[in-house]
Structures are given as structure tokens and as C-alpha cells.
Amino acid sequence: MNQVNRGLCLIRSLIAGLLTTVTVRTNSRFSLSVQATPLSNDYCHFSSQDSTEKEQLRQSTIKGSKNAQIEYNEILVRHARLLSECRSQSWLHNQAIWLRLYPCDSLEGRIDEILDRLVNKGYNQIYLGVFYNGLVLLPKNDNSTTWPSILDSPNKENKDLLAEIIKKAHLRGVKVYAWMFSLNYGYLYGQRNDRQMAIARNGKGENSLAFLAQQSQLFIDPYNEQARQDYSELLRLILQRRPDGVLFDYIRYPRGEGNQSAVGDVKDLWIYSEASLSVLLNRARNNKGHFLIERFLNQGYIVPNDLLEADQLYRQEASPLWQGRTPADKEMSEPLNERYERIKEEIWYLTVAHAAQGILDFLNFANEQVKRQGIAVGSVFFPDGNQPVGQRGFDSRLQPWDRFPETIEWHAMSYALCDQPECILRQVQKVLSAATPNQTKVVPALAGFWGKNSENRPSLETQMSALHSNFPQLNSISHFSFSWQEPEFDSQRKFCKD
């Protein structure tokens, strides 16, 4: 077994050990009502005629026509039935879209317009941004969280866009998942004097605001109790609106650019905040283990003399011990250099496993809060977020998605760039190979456009057809994102244009 694979196996083994001890095709056409055109194949698109009729009724409703309101409600119910029938007969049972709302979406009729456009393209699920860039989709007067509300306009303090879109989506037969950033708490959180202890830091004293070019991303220490309490309050309020599911995004550490996109040194790891350091040091199982972990963290390395110093200080102890470590037989009688080389490697992988375990602990903590409400849970990740780099390094995101709970949905951001779908297929295959068959629901997230290739990406139809041909067990796919699909409409929504 080569060194990289041995390191990966050791990381997975350590994570497993730490987890138990840390608290903190059918293209069928079918008969439909004569009142509507049959939906088009697997993607369930409505005809332009049906879409236009619905939009005209919506506009007449805004102008106050009671008859139009009645007809509009009728067509919404009819389209909901047609969409449900089409999806049930297609291999693609769920076609989802990623969506963010803007303050201007509080204008009369705007939510209806957004939802109608989504239904027209066959989407029966929405992944709605409820916490991103340090803002929350909650009414200002019902926002007891640490973060400001997305909608902060005068006279709209009680406007509940989240509750409204859930209600109106359900009328159309569309489910709404609350899409939430997780370890990325946003710039404003990092400006609070009373939250400095909650911020993740590396061994150079940096937080992610100093580390990243994108100054809006502020990552927290997943072991910090204050950070967890803040997130728990946010989750409580989101769950009160009864979304159909919750998707946890940014279940990872920041990813730098260039050489900083990989970690190969302990001081690259985001484990130097007080809570994370405390948990890591408490993983020691004897004084020698504690001494060497602390020396490794402070120096960024250990040398053979550090082992000798530990032996002198704690003569009554044998091998240094920490969680997950089983010393080699007769380790203390080995030549110093042999013992040093082994311990040096193992203590590095311990710190990597500790960093990864923080991510898993945070996800499990959030997952449990949602599960108690009987609401579906999913995690969002990049298939390459946990890859090894070089002889002993790792992708700096340290995203251990292959250790995510097998009972939640796995939403793999399959954004690989190539002229053909093969690179995307490889990413999805990697995820499916790690998932538990018949238990873990894998939902690939695709980027692209309907009916055209772009930026070395095939069209959405081409990508989905390739996925279905190669992985017929898949029945749910999502598209990132609505703003990409509708750039002009997105601009109108941002700037309150009609």
C-alpha cells in the first residue's frame, strides 16, 4: 500500500475512532385534459401557450380582476396535477432548482411569477437560500438570530418571504428545501467583538477573511459552543416555517488559491481556535501523548529529541497515546529514528482527522435538530473536496463527505468542465461508489443551460441523458441555479424592475 493510500486509511480509521468519543426510460406521452397541452417528455416542460395563458391571468389578477383570480387559481391546481403525473411517469421523479430571493421579490405578484416560471420548466422542487453571505430569510420582526434579515425594507418588517413561498409552492405541487450555509457564517459575524472566540483560525493566526480573496466568507470553529448555539437558534426559526427539507452547504473549511488549495502542514489546518485546541489536546490518553500533540501544534513539527524529552518527563509511561492510536508491539525498544518516523506520521494524521471530525460533529449536531422535526436532511459537497494531494497533503476544504451520515441525502455538486459528460459521470460515479446502496439518496447537482452548451459544459439535457444511461438508479437531479437560467429576470428582481 503506498503512502497516500495508507494515510487515507489511517485518517478514516481515526475519524471512526474519534466519532465514538467526542461529545462536543420512459419518454412516455400520456392523455391529459383537453385544457392543457401534454408535457414534453422526461423534463415535463409546459408549452409556451400554457405558460403565456398563466402569465396573462397572473397579471390580470394583480390588476384586481376577480374572475382572473379564480381562473388563475384553477390553472395553478391543474398544472400541479399535470406536473405530478408527468414526474411520476418519468425516470426523473424530482427535478430541482437552486434559488435565492432578493428584497425586491417582496413586490406584489413576484413570488407567483418566480414559481410559475419554475413550474413551466418542469421543476417540482426548490432549494431555497435561507442563510447565505451572513443574511437570513426571516422577517425582521421575527429574527432573534445573530444575523440580519435579507428583507430589511421599511414597512416590511413582518413580511415572511420564506413562509409565503412555501405556501405558494405547495399549491403548485412543488416542495421547498431550506438551503443553508453551515460553517461559513459571513463577514458581519466576524465583526462582532463577542464572537471572536467562535472564529476558526489556522496556525498562522489567520481567519478566513484574511486567508481568502472573497472577503464575505467567514468560517467558524465547528467545536465552538457559541457558534453552535447561534446556528441552533437559526435552525429553530427556519424549521418553524415547515420546509420540506433542509440542505446543509459549506460543510467544510475554506479553500485557498494556488499552493493554499492544499494542506500539508499542521499550521495550515483550521484547528487553532480555543475550542478546537482544547478538544484536540483532550484526545491525548497519557501525558506523553499530550506533550507531543502540544509540541507538534506549537512548533509545526516534532523532532527525535521531542520524543526523548517526553520519555524523560514521564518515565512511568510507555508509548505516547491518543484516541485511535494503537502502538506497535515493543515500540519503546525500537531504535529512536524508527519510532520517531512512525509517530511523526501518526500525529500529523491525528490532527487532520481532528479537523475533519469537527465538520462531521457539526453536521451531526444540525442533522439531529432537523430530524426531530421529521423533516428531510441533505448535505451539499464537492466530490473532490476530500481528495489527497501529493504524498501526505489534502484538499484544504477537508470535506469528509464519504463519512457523512448514510441516511441523509447526498447532494454532489458535479460541476466538472469538459466538452462531453464524461468528467461529470466520473464525479457522480465516485459519489455512488461511496454511498450505501438502497439507503443513501444521491442527488447530483448540475450546472449548465437548457438547449445549449456553455463554458465547456454540455447542455442540461445532454448531462441528464448521460446520467440516466449510466446510472439508471438515479431519479433526482438539481440544476444550479435559477439566476443562471434567467439572467435578465434575475437582474429585474435585484433592482425592482417590472
Image (cartoon, helix red, strand yellow):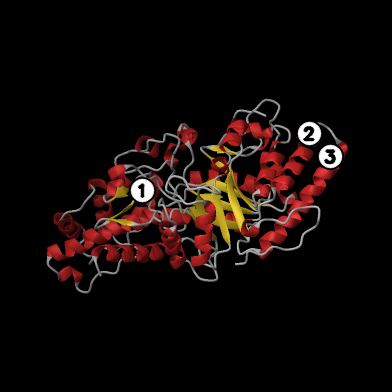
Image quadrant occupied by the C terminus: top right
Closer to us: 69 or 4:
69
Closer to us: 445 or 420:
420
Q: What residue type is labelled 2?
A: Ile
Q: Which amino acid does label 3 sit on?
A: Ala
**Circles 2 and 3: CB atoms closer than 8 Å:** no
Residue holding disc 3: 68
Give coordinates of residue 94: x percent, y percent. Answer: 62, 58
- The kind of secondary structure element at disc 3 is helix
Give coordinates of residue 362: x percent, y percent. Answer: 48, 53
Give coordinates of residue 397: x percent, y percent. Answer: 38, 50
Residue 393, quarter of picture: bottom left
Look at 33% across and 66% down and name the residue there: 9
Residue holding disc 1: 271
Label 1 packing within 10 angstroms: few (<14), some (14-19), many (20+): many
The answer for how far apart the CA atoms under marks 2 and 3 are is 9 Å
- Residue 242 vs 442, above or below: the answer is above
Q: Could you say which disc has been placed on residue 62 in the image?
A: 2
Look at 26% across and 57% down and name the residue there: 392
